Image: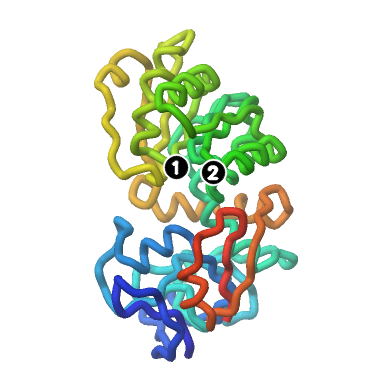
């Protein structure tokens, strides 16, 4: 079969022939891959930088996708923890990690949208209690996952959603997809802190795709500005686009009813993710969580991989 293959972490995947994977467990089957998207998570897998990397090479990247099962049904799948990922003509899947799709579901859209959507969806269902009519701040709202988080927060009943990011055009676009207010993260750090505190001091949940210096700028000013510090604030750390480390003042943990938690592989079990997938798939398939996509033949993987990332369109490889 043909696949995208990583043989060295310091080079991009190349399209080449690779051995056909063989099922080895009671719940495993070989499937035909219909679509697999290029996520930031996949880039981290392919260059060995993601925290789940085992260092095993060669590997076929791709953490999820849409496949055709042996019985003819289409299904969304999460790849097993092996070197056989989703970016291939065929792969091996664990049926316990598969969710059949509605008959009218678009495989490309499902493959594109599930990864950026699941972070906020799972976090709001599995990591915190999301109060009806709660208020949400999304840090990093101009990326694909951040845009999805804005949509999802509104879909799940948020009364007010604030989107924060740098790109001025995409910030304005957030107002058309559910954001009630936007905050620019560009400019003088002190001014950024003030803008965030003024706009988001009364939120119930922060969904943070940035971390790093942005979290440092936002956290304490936001907490100090709250009208009632005894009212809980849950800060959910999901991504680290602004830096992998942040200096958190001890006063943030003592001076308010403040919960700092993470959401991702490990903090949420595989079973927890899978339990959320049917409802999330239905929301995507029904058009409630749209996403712009770009369909690319898998044979072009090397060229596309080297292109600048485009947050406005999710690349989906098809065999």
**45 or 70, nearer to the observer:** 45
Say whether residue 224 is left or right of residue 170.
Answer: left
**124 or 172, nearer to the observer:** 172
**289 or 145, nearer to the observer:** 145
Q: How far across and how far down the image is residue 43, in percent?
A: 41, 64
Q: Residues within 10 Å of mark 1 (few under 14, many from 20)?
A: many
Q: Where is residue 135, by image quadrant?
A: top right
* Label 2 to label 1: alpha-carbon separation: 7 Å
Who's the residue at 36% across and 15% down the image?
Answer: 256
Who's the residue at 61% across and 80% down the image?
Answer: 71
Q: Are marks 2 and 1 in contact (CB under 8 Å)?
A: yes
Give the residue number, with chain letter if any, for mark 1: 209
Give the residue number, with chain letter if any, for mark 2: 146
Q: Is residue 19 above or below residue 78?
A: below
Q: Where is residue 16, by image quadrant?
A: bottom left
Q: How far across and how far down the image is residue 109, in percent?
A: 65, 62
Task: Give the secondary structure at mark 2.
Answer: helix
Residue extending farthest to the top is: 227
Who's the residue at 52% across and 30% down the image?
Answer: 137
The C terminus lies in quadrant: bottom right
Q: How far across and how far down the image is residue 125, in percent?
A: 51, 39
Q: Is residue 179 above or below residue 69?
A: above
Q: Is residue 240 above or below residue 214?
A: below
Query: Disc number at residue 143?
Result: none
Residue extending farthest to the front is: 188
**80 or 119, nearer to the observer:** 119
Q: How is the image coloured?
A: rainbow
Tell me, yes or no, if residue 282 can be seen here. Answer: no
């Amino acid at each position: 079969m043909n696949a995208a293959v990583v043989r060295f972490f310091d080079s991009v995947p190349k399209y080449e022939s690779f051995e056909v994977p063989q099922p080895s467990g009671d719940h495993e089957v070989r499937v035909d891959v219909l679509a697999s998207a290029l996520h930031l998570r996949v880039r981290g897998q392919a260059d060995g930088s993601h925290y789940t990397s085992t260092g095993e090479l060669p590997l076929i990247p791709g953490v999820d996708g849409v496949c055709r099962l042996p019985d003819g049904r289409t299904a969304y799948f999460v790849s097993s923890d092996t070197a056989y990922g989703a970016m291939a003509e065929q792969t091996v899947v664990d049926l316990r990690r598969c969710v059949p799709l509605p008959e009218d579901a678009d495989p490309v859209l499902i493959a594109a949208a599930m990864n950026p959507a699941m972070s906020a969806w799972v976090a709001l269902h599995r990591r915190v209690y999301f109060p009806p009519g709660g208020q949400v701040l999304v840090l990093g709202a101009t990326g694909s996952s951040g845009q999805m988080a804005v949509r999802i927060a509104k879909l799940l009943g948020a009364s007010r959603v604030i989107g924060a990011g740098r790109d001025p055009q995409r910030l304005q676009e957030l107002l058309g997809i559910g954001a009630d207010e936007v905050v620019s993260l560009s400019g003088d750090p002190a001014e950024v802190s003030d803008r965030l505190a003024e706009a988001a001091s009364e939120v119930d949940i922060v969904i943070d795709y940035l971390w790093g210096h942005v979290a440092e700028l936002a956290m304490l000013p936001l907490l100090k500005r709250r009208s009632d510090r005894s009212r809980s604030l849950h800060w959910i750390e999901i991504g680290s686009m602004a830096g992998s480390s942040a200096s958190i003042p001890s006063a943030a943990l003592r001076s308010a009813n403040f919960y700092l938690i993470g959401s991702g592989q490990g903090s949420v079990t595989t079973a927890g993710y899978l339990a959320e997938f049917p409802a999330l798939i239905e929301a995507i398939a029904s058009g409630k969580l749209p996403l712009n996509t770009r369909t690319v033949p898998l044979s072009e993987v090397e060229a596309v991989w080297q292109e600048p990332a485009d947050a406005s369109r999710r690349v989906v490889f098809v065999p």
